[in-house]
Image (spheres, rainbow, N blue to C red):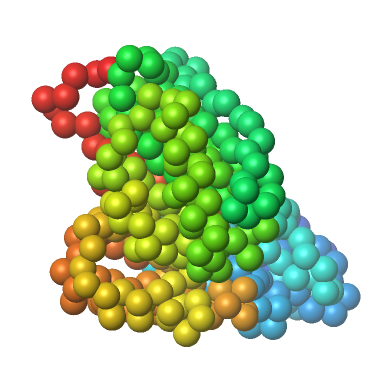
Amino acid sequence: MVKIRTFDEFKIEVESTSDNKEKSILVRNYVKEQTDQGGFPVVEEENVTFVYLGKVKNKISVAGDMNNYSLAADYMKKIEGTNLYYKRIKFPLDARIQYIYIKDGKLTLDPLNKKQCFGGLGPFSELQMPMYKLPKEIDYDPEAHHGKIQAFRFHSEIMDNNRIVHVYLPPNYDPSEKYPVIYAQDGSDYLRFGFFDNILDNLIKEGLIEEVIVVFVDPANRLLEYDLNDDYVDFLVRELVPYIDANYSTIRNPSKRLVMGASFGGLISVYAAFKHSRVFRNAASQSGYLSRKKDRIIREFEKSSKKKIKFYLDCGTYETNVGLVFGNFIEGNRMMCETLRARGYKFVYQELHEGHNWGNWRSRIRNILTTFFKRHRTQSRL
């Protein structure tokens, strides 16, 4: 087996050559060698070298989860006499990072890296460290029995607006049976970027979770509705839940309802359960914006008596300055956990070496489902 050269070995070889044509040949050969055997970026244990090959008029930098997408935090350095630029950064061995290059003021994907991850802001290049576990359950399995998704427009009298709602019915849905229900905020995004339906199909096929109904709720005005909005919570509790219970075969028990969401959707999900624990006794927040309005939701938990709610929360260690203006999400999540622990709540909390994006959230949907709806061996399949 041919030993792969380290980036430093390659760099020393190039810099020890005075002939620019020879340097170009060495660069071309190294890029081919690395593409065939290791790929880009170059991962050497915790050290990751980002590489760009091409003409740069002024500057090029790496912007990503690790530096809150700062345009000027990680400039790349040129190997003199070549068109190769590089930047070395250390990461935990289980990290997953989304990034993009800023070349002469313009965004560009890493042309040497085929791995990409998609979200609401479009594609980003993706770095998977050696110990990162790719979530296989997000892949479509043609051999699995697939649930059905129904879509309809729902009018809210309370909000005085319309929105799209998708309802996932499990593969063996039987109106004579009763099913737990999940209410997911940013519903279309959970389907499009989170592959939630694939995950459900695969986990049900493996017998890992109960068959569940999932209501994917789209926002009509996301920033308004998810910002600790009591009218939106009333819409969920007084309009949508009764409609779903009346039209589908649901278990009408708060212990069998979960409200969940990511980012702002995580905040409103925690708030909905807090305000209406007689409707939702389970809540999941992925990278929830729990520090919003000077930690208002945390203060409300501190002042109130304990409610019968079980929580799941997760957050990425690279969510320290989300959006450059929204603040430190991981600090808010840690504060919430301290409060939940002090008040005696049951909760699950995870921190991952990832950022604020759908690549992170879709990898934890399995954890949420098995936390609340794990199928025990004594249960029969529906």
Q: For this rendering, which residue is in front, 294 or 335?
A: 294
| Image quadrant where residue 206 sits | top left
| Residue at the (16%, 31%) spot, across then down | 376
Residue 338 at x, y percent in the picture: 25, 77
The residue sitting at 40% across, 74% down in the picture is: 297
Quadrant in the rendering for residue 126: bottom right
Placement of 69 over or under 271, stated as above or below: below
Quadrant (top left, top right, bottom left, bottom right) of the N terminus: top left
**Residue appearing at x 77%, y 61% in the figure:** 108
How many numbered badges does the structure rendering display?
0
- Residue 368 in the image, given as x and y percentages of width and height: 34, 47
Q: Nearer the viewer, residue 19 or 220?
A: 220
Does any portion of residue 249 appear in the rendered image? Answer: yes
Which residue is farthest right?
57
Q: Position of residue 54 (x, y in %)?
A: 81, 63
- Is 117 rendered above or below residue 228? above
Q: Which residue reaches farthest front? A: 157
Return the residue found at the far left: 378
Residue 26, compared with residue 35, is above or below; it is below
Tell me the residue at 62%/81% (across/down): 325
Is residue 375 found left or right of 226 in the rendered image? Answer: left
In the image, residue 106 lies at what x, y percent? Answer: 82, 68
Camera-nearest residue between 124 and 267: 267
Q: Is residue 285 visible?
A: no
- Establish if 176 lies above or below 303: above
Q: In the figure, residue 270 lies in which quadrant?
A: bottom left
Quadrant where the image shows the C terminus: top left
